[in-house]
Amino acid sequence: MLILYDIDMTLLETRHIGIDCLHDAGRESFSPEFTIEGLNFGGCLDPDIIARMLVMNGLDPSEEHINILRRGYHERLTTAASEREISWALPGAHELVRATRDHPMSFTLGLLTGNFPETGTIKLQRAGFDMNDFEVCVWGDDSPHHPPTRSHLPPVGMQKFRAIKGREINPESVIIVGDTVHDVSCALDSGCTVLAVATGHATAEELRDAGAHRVIEDLTDTEGILSWLTKQWRPFAPANA
């Protein structure tokens, strides 16, 4: 079984610090009037967020402009992380990651997130997570399509699993853990299973209405979550089947 964790508002929170760093990068790189007002970040991919920020400010969402903002964001988040705390694990997150990592059913752990790898890694490490626990990492810039969407990412995760493990995996045995309706829809689009956690802006009812297979209020019931996960187990298909 492959368990793919979202990062922001699923495993951790940054209390707006990441968004502030991205906003500051826009103001310093392009204009003091650079705005992000009204932009929705939850469940979106960083490349798409940056492109929409540029368009909102009357700028061409070219690869050059996107890379300018990406570098500026990384630089500012790196500086912030060297000066103060910038991310905090959500209740139960460390315990669940450890429990799934050490489970006798040998779950494969990974990430499925809209974050760029360089900034997502900073958030995770500063919140006390060990990147070595996440064997299959699917980042916000991993979509092979343009424009990128979150629904492009689960197939990438399954491809990475095949490359690492040398065998196929049934989509139903890919569990996506996330806090937004986008996490739910991207999983359902690929036939994956969804564990939705109402620790973000979406309510439990909204996550159920989106089609999540299970909805929980937070990650604190480690044993209950493990029990549910083990019931989702499907046999692996042999490589080249």
Image (cartoon, helix red, strand yellow):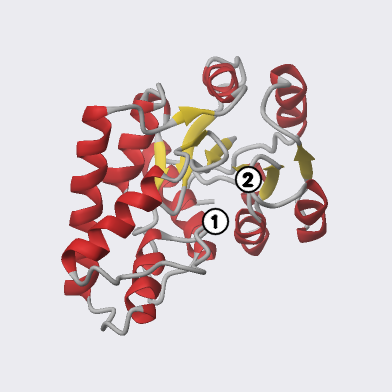
Q: Quadrant of the N terminus?
A: top right
Q: Quadrant of residue 224?
A: top right
Q: Position of residue 83 (x, y in %)?
A: 23, 28
Question: In the image, what residue occupies the spot 30% across and 35% down?
Answer: 122
From the viewer's perspective, is 42 left or right of 172? left
Q: Position of residue 231 (x, y in %)?
A: 77, 31
Secondary structure beneath disc 1? loop
Q: Would you name the residue on which mark 2 appears?
A: 200
Question: In the image, what residue occupies the spot 30% across and 44% down?
Answer: 119
Examine the rendered structure and indicate whether residue 102 appears above or below residue 131: above
Q: Which is nearer the eye, 201 or 194?
A: 201
User: Furthest residue to the front?
Assistant: 32
Q: Would you name the residue on which mark 1 appears?
A: 42
Number of disc labels: 2
From the viewer's perspective, is 105 left or right of 108? right
Examine the rendered structure and indicate whether residue 215 appears above or below residue 73: above
Secondary structure beneath disc 2? loop
Question: In the image, what residue occupies the spot 75% across and 52% down?
Answer: 207
Classify 10 Å Cα crowding around label 2: few (below 14), some (14-19), many (20 and above). some
Identify the mark at residue 102; answer none if there is no mark: none
From the viewer's perspective, is 123 left or right of 157? left
Three-letter amino acid code at disc 1? Answer: Gly
Q: Are marks 1 and 2 in contact (CB under 8 Å)?
A: yes
Which tag, 1 or 2, sits closer to the chain's start? 1
Three-letter amino acid code at disc 2? Answer: Gly
Q: Position of residue 107 (x, y in %)?
A: 56, 27
**Marks 1/2: CA distance?**
8 Å
Examine the rendered structure and indicate whether residue 132 appears above or below residue 188: above
